[in-house]
Image (spheres, grey):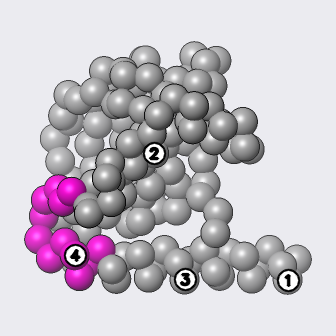
């Protein structure tokens, strides 16, 4: 039990540190390509209207706030401390929710190649998937 509590505390500490770093690098709303190839940082200061988009093979880690998406007819809501893996180009509708200027939404998106994504799905326990296709889309809790 103590190990689980320590792990949860460490996860919260890491998420809080990530938010502090993102606040420094994203002082205002927007999208910011990172110097790390294939990585983009996102900040939103208010809940948004639904936007049509395409999810590409990627990992999206939510550092703070919540996101709601409809992909393949399935509604998925995920938030701080969770990540979404997408393995195919898929049309989607997405929006940030429960966001305010005092507590902005922050996420980090990392583009992936299919081989890496397949390995992450194999290693991820307790993930949700869409339409029984584990290589298409999944949401899971991030660990330390």
Q: Residue furthest right?
A: 1
Image point 36% across, 35% down: which residue? 69
- Asked if the residues shown at circle 3 and circle 2 are in contact, with their CB atoms under 8 angstroms apart, the answer is no
Q: Is residue 54 left or right of residue 124?
A: left
**Disc ID at residue 25:** 4
Residue 58 lies, in percent from the top left, at 42, 39
Q: Is residue 92 left or right of residue 10?
A: left
Label 4, label 2: how far apart the Cα atoms are: 20 Å
Helix, strand or loop at mark 3: helix
Q: Is residue 70 visible?
A: no
Label 3, label 2: how far apart the Cα atoms are: 21 Å
In the picture, which quadrant includes the N terminus?
Answer: bottom right
- Asked if the residues shown at circle 4 and circle 3 are in contact, with their CB atoms under 8 angstroms apart, the answer is no
**Disc ID at residue 135:** none
Q: Residues within 10 Å of mark 2 (few under 14, many from 20)?
A: many
In the rendered image, which residue does mark 3 sit on? 13
């Amino acid at each position: 039990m103590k190990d689980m509590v320590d792990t949860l505390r460490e996860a919260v500490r890491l998420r809080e540190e990530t938010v502090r770093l993102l606040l420094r690098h994203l002082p205002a709303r927007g999208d910011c390509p990172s110097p790390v190839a294939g990585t983009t940082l996102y900040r939103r200061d208010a809940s948004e209207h639904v936007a049509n988009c395409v999810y590409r093979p990627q990992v999206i880690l939510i550092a703070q706030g919540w996101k709601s998406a409809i992909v393949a007819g399935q509604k998925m809501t995920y938030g701080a401390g969770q990540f979404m893996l997408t393995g195919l180009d898929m049309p989607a509708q997405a929006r940030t929710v429960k966001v305010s200027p005092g507590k902005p939404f922050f996420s980090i998106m990392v583009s992936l190649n299919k081989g890496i994504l397949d390995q992450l799905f194999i290693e991820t326990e307790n993930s949700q998937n869409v339409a029984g296709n584990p290589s298409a889309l999944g949401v899971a809790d991030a660990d330390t």
